[in-house]
Image (cartoon, helix red, strand yellow):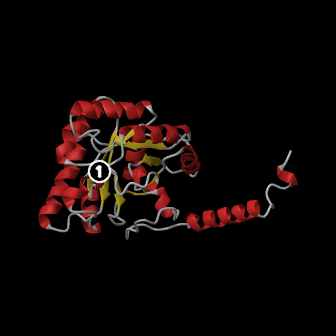
Amino acid sequence: MKKITVLDIGKMKGEGEKIPVLTAYDYTMAKILDEAGVPIILIGDSAGMVFAGYKNTLSVTMDEIRYHTRAVANGTKNAMIVADMPFLSYQTSVEDAKRNAGLLVQEGAEAVKLEGGVVVADTISAIIDMGVPVMGHIGLTPQAIHRMGGYKVQGKEKKQRKRLFDDARAVEKAGAFSVVLEGMPSDLAREITEAISLPTIGIGAGPHCDGQVLVIHDILGLYDNIKPRFIKRYANLKELISSAVNVYVEDVKKGRFPGKEHSF
């Protein structure tokens, strides 16, 4: 498998090939996903929730994303590495956004993702002008949950639908190589996907997007604090891990481990 680039992602849309995307936050998981052939690995700010136990993504810092990006980069050979830009890393000024995007690239990211449409179009263009590819993110944007009144589906009303179309076109015009569509009706996601040249990556946006992204802890059953409708669980590793740990604890308590085969 060759190294995936922005050109490959664009070609996948052109040829009608679906684009699977998963998050990773550490070397071991990144290596597993990379060897499985996942074309894009996203270091999501969801790390704050599944790794640190934050109640949302707003507390995640640049230092945390930089650390996770460095770890993922060490475990990845072929997949394209996209790093989330956390809250306050790009909203304050274009200069801050450029500097922080550059820092993530220095850690091993090959693209960055930031939330918003029309309001961040100039920021997207400025980062791209530096030579850094950008993945957009519109619809339900978790960094704006207080304005949205929580994790609510966007685009149900006519006015919202127009705003999301405007956002998608703004991200496209700004030069992004793809855009995440989150938390919107599937018919709206289909219309946006058909209307723009960018590959669309859905999460809670139905089956008509060019690709899909989910948090790795969700599909493996490792994180169950919240259970959005759009998640499909492919394994229950929480039960497997709990079972293994219980056996280990009993082995140690009863002197079954370590045995002769584990001793020098």
**Relative to 3, is 47 on the left or the right?**
left
Quarter of the picture containing the C terminus is top right
Give me the residue at 29% from left, 51% from top.
137
Neighbor class of circle 1 (other Cα within 10 Å; few <14, some 14-19, many 20+) is many
Quarter of the picture containing the N terminus is top right
Give me the residue at 55% from left, 47% from top.
34
Farthest residue, direction left: 159
Q: Kindly identify the amino acid type of the residue bearing the numbered disc 1.
A: His
Residue 251 at least partly seen: yes
Q: Is mark 1 on a helix, strand or loop?
A: strand
Residue 262 position, x and y percent, is 82, 51
Query: Vertically, is 207 above or below 146?
Result: below
Residue 95 position, x and y percent, is 24, 30
Query: Vertically, is 176 above or below 52?
Result: above
* Residue where numbered disc 1 is placed: 137
Which is nearer the eye, 155 or 19? 155
Which is nearer the eye, 221 or 157? 221
Query: Vertically, is 203 above or below 112?
Result: below
Give me the residue at 40% from left, 50% from top.
48
